[in-house]
Image (cartoon, coloured by chain):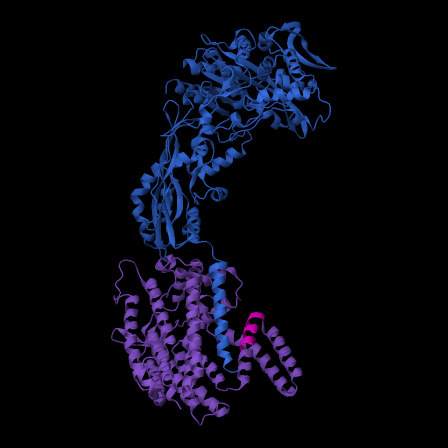
Chain colours: A purple, B blue
Amino acid sequence: MVRETNKYFKFDWTTIILFFLLVGFGWLNILSASHTGGDIDYFDLSHSYGKQLVFIFLTFVLIILLLGIDAKFYERFSSIIYLVSMLSLVGLFIFGKNVNGATSWYAIGGMTLQPSEFAKTATALAVAKHISDLNTNINSFKDQIQTFIIIIIPAILVLLQNDTGSTIVYGAFFFVLYREGLPKYYLSIGISVIILSVLALKFGALTASIIGSILILGYHFKNRKKFSLFQALFALLLSIGLSFGVKFFYQNVIPPHQQDRISLWLRLEKDPVKLQQMKKTFAYNLNESEKAISSGGFTGKGFMEGTRTTGKFVPEQHTDYIFSTVGEEWGFLGCSFVVILFILLLLRILHLAELQKSQFSRVYGYGVASIIFIHFLINIGMVMGLIPTIGIPLPLFSYGGSGLWAFTILIFIFIKLDSNRINEW
Amino acid sequence: MRQLLLFASIIFVGLLFLSRLFYLQIYTSNEYDLFDDNAIRKVYDYPKRGFIYDRNGKLLVANQPSYDVMVIPREVEPLDTLEFCSLLKIDKEQFIKTYNKARRYSPRLASVFLSHLSKEDYAALQEKMRKFKGFYIQKRSLRHYQRNIGANVLGDIGEVNTSDLKRDLYYRMGDLKGKQGVEASYEKILRGVKGIKFIQKDRFNRNIGPYKEGKFDTIPEQGKDITITIDSKLQEYGELLMQNKRGGVIAIEPSSGEILAMVAAPTYDPNILVGRERSKNFTKLFNDSAKPLFNRSLQGVYEPGSPFKLMNALIGLQEGVITPNETVTCYAGYKYGNRFMKCHCYIGKRNNMVSGIQESCNAYFATTYRKILDKDGNASTGIDTWSKHAKSFGLGDFLNNDLFVGQKGRIPNRAYYKHIYPKTFYSTYTISNAIGQGEVATTPIQLANMVAAIANRGYYYTPHIIKSIENKTLPENFTKAKYTTIDKVHFEPVIEGMLQVYKKGTAASLQVKDIEICGKTGTVQNSTIIDSVKTDLTDHSIFVAFAPKNDPKIAIAVFVENGYWGSRFAGKIASLMIEKHIKGEITRKDLEEWILKHSLEDEYAKPYSGKPFKINKQTRLQLINDSEYKRLKRRLKKIQNP
């Protein structure tokens, strides 16, 4: 009966406060990035900041709805939600609207809706449902495959719509599966493949094969029992194959514009003329965003005072490149504040997930944290030039109704699940 | 431990981001400077550069409009290149070259396509400009030197170079700045302060509006007009007289230290350093073996020769080692040890101070010089005393004036000789100083200043070029008399000697009716090095004078390189300048005629000829040809009735 009297305190207010801090600070930066001079009319729908403010207010309605629905609903209806979501993705091939080369939007009246944003939540629910099913054993190969299929379907659908960024986000589920008992060799193989690929591209296939071989043989001689010579030789062949395969893949399969992005990221391009060319074309955003962040210095130029932001030097600054506005106007202090807010939010969700008694809630919570984490990693990493250009928004921060609502749903379903854990016996 | 993977990844990424932010925003970030921000366009508003007037209010330097053809490559539309080129007077090849250069610089930004159009070309072009999309005409302001005189006085302005930019943050690439002469030394007053507008631009380089509502914008401050001490008529006359000669003439008003004329020869028309031809002409002047850019009146360091005897006479009197009436017997020279210094006097001539100066007797001054140095029986302290007196006339050091260039000259003291004569030091060692040769060296302006101090009987005002600046008083340095270490009484006998130089001495032929001129001739041996052999050249002709004797209005020093004896060239020029200044017109037409007609160009060509040549007595004077003579006469007429 304690639960009844403290009806509002059962929600995790730490998460809610962090959520609103990010949304609020995000809006201030959208205001600065999309303001074009003159007086500010906060609800002027012809400006991004006006629309975003409306989206934010609608978020409250959404939150009340989400928290009002019975917690059990999400678990019970997860399959249906997933199904509907996948259908909405498929529907894009017929009714979709093409924006910036990606067919990811439904246009309804004057509004656009991006179903791929919501598909992440749906997939997280479906994965949680599947893993928490008593019949599912993550160690069995069959169940692994089933789980992968749940994840891969939306990933492939968004990839077909030319939305590479969203596809990569589905990699986030690796964290979830690993937490729930996916065999360790997945991690070893995953990390090895990434490292070998990077080595092969950066230093050539031969160097990568040699390094790979030394490590594999070294591991074999240390753990002869666990890792037999036969296994080692097999791994060796694979790693050499991978080293040369990556190069081939990079040169012949990946489209040229993505090749360029990787080559710039790995500093493969040495020709200064070509580099200059890159900086003027696809790396223009990156170059400008780094300059904007750098020019902010320690304290930044002040709210609405950023010269590069005012001059709209960074294209797409209110969406994917919103963090460069923070960098220019709020400086190192503001950027650190945002990074720390995200880390606190992620750790809080992670902590709550571990506290869950039901496996469904825990897996879902993990999914929430992982998805936000991948967005955070890729978006800020990209804006600061740490990883190749991949277009995905910064959660809660970037302009966009679909994104904001999708993350609101993602997070508040978990808050609802969490508030219900006392009953979960 | 499976829970740790995501946890550790989050922490790791967080730290990675913070360190990247640290690197970007603190480690590699510079202090924010509005001027370095390329999101802000800086538009400068250049004020009018101040005018320069001569002492009589005659305008010397003003501004003139100049027109540059600008191009914005992106906006250029196909055009009739043939017509365009013929309007601009360029060929098609140059058109393509310039256009491509501008395009490489920036397709969006304006570049100068052709600078400094003449007024006529501008008029013709302006009517048709609308036909050539992407091109437009921009007006700029250039200097205009009203009279073709005083290139060395006025100087010129040119674009700032990289070291200027580093030294003074006021300047921005492409700004103009005084490079020489008055333009350089009064740069800050003449230029004013440019105004600046900060404009926020977007990534397409379009203006969006004033940055922070123009909070940081400034309005330009007009450059101030200045008046200089030069008398343009006298200056022009001096430059005319120095045609076909090399050297310097400096005339100072003793009662104020104002420089009336400052002639350096050869000179050039200051207008050739304005506009499109500037850099071409500058290179030409720079490479000219006659060194027209070298301001001989300020930078030419010469041995002063006989005029320096005046200095020795004054020091001798001040130190009490001679009296005006004491005589020295000349043996057509002066014997010291087993060496001999020659003199023009006949053997047995007895000279007192006045006749010593009048005849420029070497023996008299050698004796005097030795007496000064040996006063205490120790030449080491003697030469220091001697040096101190000479320096009180502004010799041997920078005059600390407002001229852009200068030289220290040299008045040696004991320390100077330390490395040649480390131990023993006798007065005979430096006996050449007695007659203004040896180690003594002065610039024409120092010598003129010395004469001004003699004319004033013991003090001088630092010679300066500025007469007045709008609403500003001159610095004390120029208005306060500087006293020499010689007492007033000692000047009279020296001045009397100088008067006699004109009355019956070495300058007797140069007298000017009704003006009591006091002067002193000088003839200085000199040499140059040709193919690493020291070769003597014809003597320099030197003359110093002031007039009138009792109310000095002008003190003058004239150096004519390789002009032979003092009254031959320098003396004549000095007399003419004095007469011109005091009377305003010339009665000694004969002197004027002689100076205009004679040239020393042959003399200057000798060391470069590669052939052996003769000097002094064995040379013949060169006459100028008829057309040159007519040209000079025309210029003379213009000065007389402008």
Identify the image quadrant of residue B636.
top left
* Image position, residue A29 (x, y; %): 35, 65
Q: Nearer the viewer, residue B611 or A189?
A: A189
Q: Is residue A73 above or below residue A270?
A: below
> Is residue B377 in view from this perspective?
yes
Is A168 magenta? The answer is no
Q: Is residue A385 above or below residue B638?
A: below
Q: If the image is split into quadrants, where does the N terminus of chain A sit?
A: bottom left
Magenta span: A193-203
Q: Nearer the viewer, residue A404 or B262?
A: A404
- Seen at 42% across and 77% down, the residue is A348
* Image position, residue B452 (x, y; %): 50, 18
Q: Is residue B97 above or below residue B149?
A: below
* Image position, residue B430 (x, y; %): 67, 20
Q: Is residue B507 above or below residue A28?
A: above
Identify the image quadrant of residue A108.
bottom left
- Seen at 50% across and 65% down, the residue is B19
Q: Is residue B264 left or right of residue A73?
A: right
- Seen at 36% across and 30% down, the residue is B471
